Amino acid sequence: MAELEYFVAVAEELHFGRAATRLAIAQPALSKAVRRLESRLGTALLHRSSRHVALTPAGEALLTHGRHALNAVGAAVEMARRAGDRHTRLRLVIKAGGDANLLSGILAAYARRPDAHQVDILFGGATDRADHVRDGRADVALLYVPFDDTTGLDHETLTVEGRVAILSPGHRLATRSEVTLADLAQEPLPRWKGVRWTGAPEGRPGPEVEDGAVLMDLIRLGRTVAVLPRSLALPAQPGLVYRPVADAARSALVVAWAQEDRRRPVASFVAAAVEAAGAAGEG
């Protein structure tokens, strides 16, 4: 496992010196470990030159799966530690405003359960909440599918909703009552860092964003438009126009947890979340 950790560090830094500093080991020892891993796998993982390090196709594949493997080991250690703690606190990671107004009901439904634990709320960014669960920083998460990567996670759907386009007031589509994916086909859509393809039209390459507030400013300036789940687009902000996207695939808000996590507090929280979402849907 140490060799895999060493390789991932080099692959992320693309520099042996920086990776060695990050790992707090000598650079020659790091180079030897990576070559030993390549020898065992029977394939080159890195292209090396005196000034440049790049991943081979095999290296790119190992980086993707290696990250998941290291996260899984870290999460397993953390879950084992927490399983032995009689006073376990459950950690829920959400995006600010990314609960479709269900969070209060979920927490109340969970608190009524006899096996309930205290819930700590963690606020993740636009793209890293699933990683919080995979590496053990959080026990459960509220995620949007298909926007968030649920690799290595199980999940239950809480609510399904349509998507809306967010436009500047002067945009050519702002006077429409609704828009279609074809209308947006040539628009510069934002590229969310770390988010996989979600079924929206390709459009022209738009700016890469990580922060929702920055995205809204870019829309106001006419630099991009966005297609978001309805609950993430509300409440409406001044200076922006919101239009339903009639033919966009619907998105789902889900409660997610690690596939290998079978702890009772997690299962109880998931059941409470599903119960609360069902009650909200009936109201």
Image (cartoon, rainbow, N blue to C red):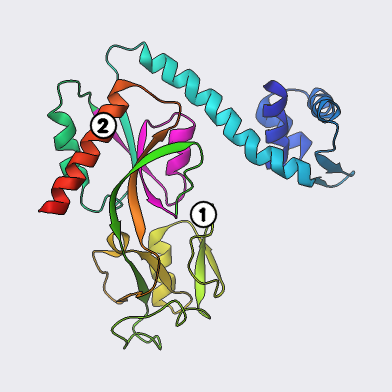
Around disc 2, counting alpha carbons within 10 Å, would you say few (fewer than 14), some (14 to 19), or many (20 or more)?
A: many
The mark lying in front, picked from 1 and 2, is 2
Which residue is tagged 2? 269
Query: Looking at the image, do the residues carrying marks 1 and 2 touch, with CB atoms under 8 Å apart?
Result: no
Q: Residue 195 carries which label?
A: 1
Seen in the image, is 30 located left or right of residue 158? right
C-alpha span from label 1 to label 2: 26 Å
Report the magenta residues as a range: 119-146
* Residue plotted at (48% across, 68% down): 200
Quadrant of the rendered image containing residue 205: bottom right
Coordinates of residue 199 in the picture (x, y in percent): 49, 64
User: Is 184 or 126 nearer to us in this picture?
Assistant: 184
Amino acid bearing label 2? Phe
Amino acid beneath label 1 = Val
Q: Left or right? Give the position of 185 relative to 248.
A: right
Q: Is residue 70 above or below residue 142?
A: above
